[in-house]
Amino acid sequence: MADRLFDIVTFDCYGTLIDWEGGIRAAFAAEAVRSGTPLDLEAALRLYGELERDVEREPYRPYREVLAETARRAAARLGWPLRPERAGFLAESVRAWPPFPDTNPGLRRLAAAGYRLGILSNVDDDLLAWTRRHFLVPFELVITAQQVGSYKPEHGHFVAARAAVGDARWLHAAQSYHHDISPCAALAIPSAWINRKREKPGGDARPLRDFPTMEGLADWLAP
């Protein structure tokens, strides 16, 4: 299709295509039942989101270890007795984190319209391999934190993607303003904000478009 706006569309995975918060909430709930200790799940989820950024800013460690360390710190802050041998419960749960209902329909529309698709994700290769089983389309380009040795919003993913896509017209779509929209603006990469939480921009970066779901992105790119 000669009138396509872009040649390749890349996506953040967790939070954009996969219900990251729902998966983490369910994992904490299951572990609380296993431990026999009540847990405020909403407080755990909020604290997890705050602490994970801190852990990712530290010297690089695999995402499996990021999940475990963040869970340990959240448990300590909440006064929740997480046993050391159970700190890996979040990594164990990743394979069950579900896609949003609009994810596969949106991806299939883009693939049918001829767009090449990719993923730029703050994750390990093996964890993403589990997640990719939930998707109904192939991804030509996959760049992980394990491959670049850093976590977004650092620029490693985007620099590697730019080298891979070359002169192709590239759009990056993501839910996180902090991890994706801001670095895209800094690197002059066109972006679309899958603004599932209806958030306001947290800085000066502005995406080309702002949609609440993948359906809106597909309506724009593959009407």
Image (cartoon, rainbow, N blue to C red):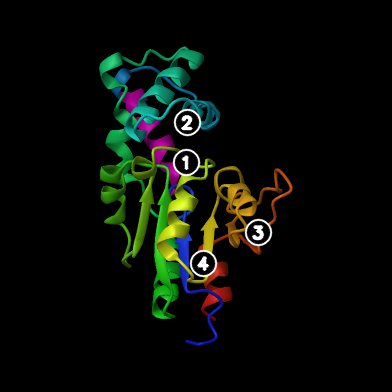
Per the image, the residue denoted by label 2 is 56
Q: Residue at position x 47%, y 74% from top?
A: 7
Nearest to viewer (mark 2 / mark 1): 2
Residue 117 lies, with reference to residue 158, above or below; the image says below
Q: Earlier in the sequence, mark 4 or mark 2?
A: 2
Q: Is residue 20 magenta?
A: yes
Could you tell whether 222 is left or right of 137 in the image? right
Q: Which circle marks residue 21 in the picture?
A: 1
Per the image, the residue denoted by label 3 is 207
Amino acid under disc 1: Glu
User: In which quarter of the view is residue 82 placed?
Assistant: top left
Mark 2 to mark 3 CA distance (whole Å): 24 Å
Determine whether the residue tagged by mark 4 lies in a helix, strand or loop.
Answer: strand
Q: Which residues are magenta?
A: 19-33
Please state the horizontal and vertical placement of residue 138, each as a whole percent of the image: 31, 66
Could you tell whether 144 is left or right of 56 in the image? left
User: Are circles 4 and 2 on residues that touch, CB within 8 Å?
Assistant: no
User: Are circles 4 and 3 on residues that touch, CB within 8 Å?
Assistant: no
Per the image, the residue denoted by label 4 is 170
Determine whether the residue tagged by mark 2 lies in a helix, strand or loop.
Answer: helix
Mark 3 to mark 1 CA distance (whole Å): 23 Å
Nearest to viewer (mark 1 / mark 4): 4
Amino acid under disc 3: Pro
